[in-house]
Every structure is written in structure tokens, then in C-alpha cells.
Image (spheres, rainbow, N blue to C red):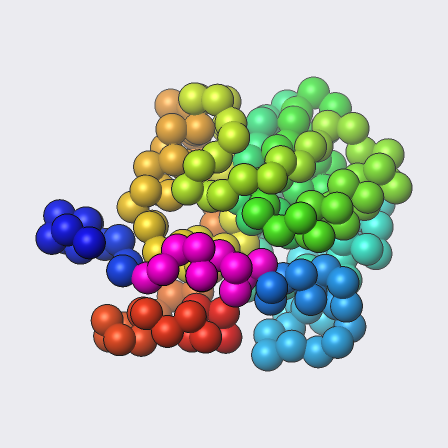
Amino acid sequence: MSDDQQAVGVVDVELETLRDAVRAEYDVVASDPDQGFHFHTGRTLTNIVGYRDEWLEGVPESAIESFAGTGNPFAMGALAIGERVVDIGSGGGIDSLIAAGMVGADGAVVGVDMTVSMLERARGAASEAGIGNVEFREAFMEELPVEDGWADVVISNGVLNLTPDKPGTLAEISRVLRPGGRLQIADILVTRPVSSEAKQRIDLWTG
């Protein structure tokens, strides 16, 4: 990796190995959400992070039980009717489906995830609920399958910490947001520097 890449904050880690490890972790969350993990999931987690009961009305249990975020992107403000939303790392679909309810039939939501089993769960939940203003696309957060300036809002929940190229991902977010659009994210924050050695340990990225 070049000095220029190091200077702008790109972490030197084997990208495909990291992606495979993250997929493996969330494949298990998708296939067996009640197994028990080192992080909270499901309705227990929605209560911890302050999701309102009315947000979950009409959201199938299959989306709720696989919820594995780190916070509440809607705590920064509800979405408005007619807005267009991109949900980065949409997982089993809970936040995308909540967003779809907030923006209504005149709005639209695109959920983006790289884990096929999570996409299948999200699509199934949307179909079960009859929610037609949301779609789920398979892609990486560093390469969002959304046209320039399409989104009014980008949301994300516990996902940006998993990319070693945060500057590149933030540039992609900027690209898909319209001028004056906004970013509402919930994520992990560290208060002290992480060593280069620790950053290269794949088990610490996923655990």
C-alpha cells in the first residue's frame, strides 16, 4: 500500500479475506438469528437502541429477528414523505422497511448488502409485508449501485466500521446524495488509536 493511501486512512488489510469473514458472520445471523452472539440481536436490540413500537408495525418478524445493528439512525430524525433513501448494509431489512414506511408510497428505498442470505431474508420480508417502495441490491458499500445524486438520505447501522476504506466509502455516499442531502448513521466509535497490528487481525474486525 502506498504512503498516499496510508495518509488518507485506508487500512492495510486483505480485503477479500475480510469480506469473507464478515459474510460468514452474518450468514449465521441470517440463518439462525436465535443462536446467540457476542452482540445483541432482534427485538432485544430494538428495545436497547430505542426503536419505537409504531416503527415496527407491519415489519415482519423475519426482518426484526435478524436485526444486528449498533444503534438507531432514526434517532437523528424521522424521514419525510416522498424522500429517497439508501440503506448501506441493509442486512435482514429492518431499517429499510422502517424507512419505506416513513417515506410512503411517493418515496423509495434501496437497501444495499453483500451477504446473499441477508438479501434473501430482506426481500422475503418486503414481499410478506407487501411493501413495494423498497428494493434490495447486492453490492459493496465501497461501490454503491445507485446513480449520482439520487438519494435525499443515506442511512447505515453498524456497518461503516467494517470497511477498511472509510474515505472511499464516504466519497461514495457523497456521490449518491443529492446536494443538501443528509447522512444518518449509527456505528461503533473508538476513543483511542487502534494499532496497525490490530487492524490487520480479521477476528477483531468481526468480533
Q: Residue at x 77, y 68 (%)?
A: 32
The foreground one among 36 and 200 is 200
On the rendered structure, is 5 left or right of 69? left
Q: Judge whether residue 76 is colored magenta.
A: no
The foreground one among 90 and 192 is 90
Residue 53 appears in which quarter of the rendering?
Answer: bottom right
Q: Residue at x 75, y 46 (%)?
A: 120
Q: Residue at x 32, y 62 (%)?
A: 13
Considering only vertical position in the picture, is 131 above or below 198?
A: above
Q: Is residue 98 at all visible to an observer of this figure?
A: no
* Residue 34 rendering spot, x and y as whole percentages: 78, 72
Image quarter hosting the N terminus: bottom left
Give the prevailing secondary structure in the magenta stretch. helix
* Residue 189 rendering spot, x and y as whole percentages: 38, 66
* Residue 50 rendering spot, x and y as whole percentages: 64, 62
Q: Judge whether residue 20 is colored magenta.
A: yes
Q: Which residues are magenta?
A: 13-23
